[in-house]
Image (cartoon, helix red, strand yellow):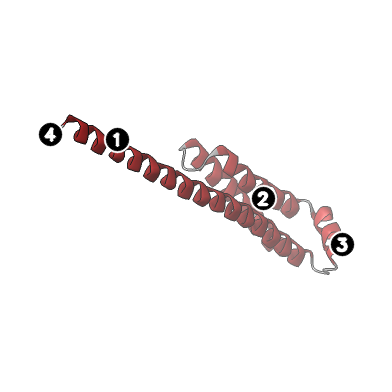
Amino acid sequence: MERLLNAMTVLSLVLILLVLRSVRRAHIRVEYSVSWLGAAAAVLVLSRWREALDWLGARLGIQDAALALVFTVGCLFLIVFYRFSIIISNLKDANISLAQRVAILEFHLQSLNESKEESSTPS
């Protein structure tokens, strides 16, 4: 079990470093990095604080603390993925709305150009 806790500690530290590096290089926006940093920090705390992990396992009805940690990690990342699904859906809706507005503006611009050409041609 100690091996699993150590592996989770290392993985959470690697995730924190990767997220911070991505923020620094502008690969990920700060507001989106908060979810990843929060999840990684929670995993780090649970993998190092054995009493909290035992308490969580007891509350979940799981005898093995390592299994409680894995279950908690899975739930945390499902929440993060759900949050990003909502964000992606909102961005897709905004993108569709923006494309429709651009199409309307192009239509109006084309109509103005056509009316201008008709009025400028001598009869």
Name the residue that disc number 1 marks: 112
> Which quarter shows the C terminus?
top left
Packing grade of label 2 (10 A; few <14, some 14-19, many >=20) is many
- Residue found at the far front of this picture: 123
Residue bearing the label numbered 2: 39
Q: Nearer the viewer, residue 87 or 13?
A: 87
Instruction: Name the kind of residue labelled 1 in the image.
Output: Leu
Q: Pointer 1: residues within 10 angstroms few (<14), some, or many (20+)?
A: few
**Left or right: 28 in relation to 13:** left
Point 69% across, 59% down: residue: 73
Q: Nearer the viewer, mark 3 or mark 1?
A: 1
The residue mark sitting in front, 4 or 2, is: 4
Residue drawn where x is 65% and y is 49% of the image = 40
Q: CA distance from mark 3 to mark 1?
A: 69 Å
Q: CA distance from mark 4 to mark 3?
A: 87 Å
Q: Earlier in the sequence, mark 1 or mark 2?
A: 2
Which amino acid is tagged 4? Ser
Q: CA distance from mark 2 to mark 3?
A: 20 Å
Label 3 or label 1, whichever comes before in sequence order = 3
Q: Quadrant of the N terminus?
A: bottom right
Q: Nearer the viewer, mark 1 or mark 2?
A: 1
Residue 105 appears at what percent x and percent y? 37, 39
Residue identified by numbered label 3? 59
Callout 1: helix, strand or loop?
helix
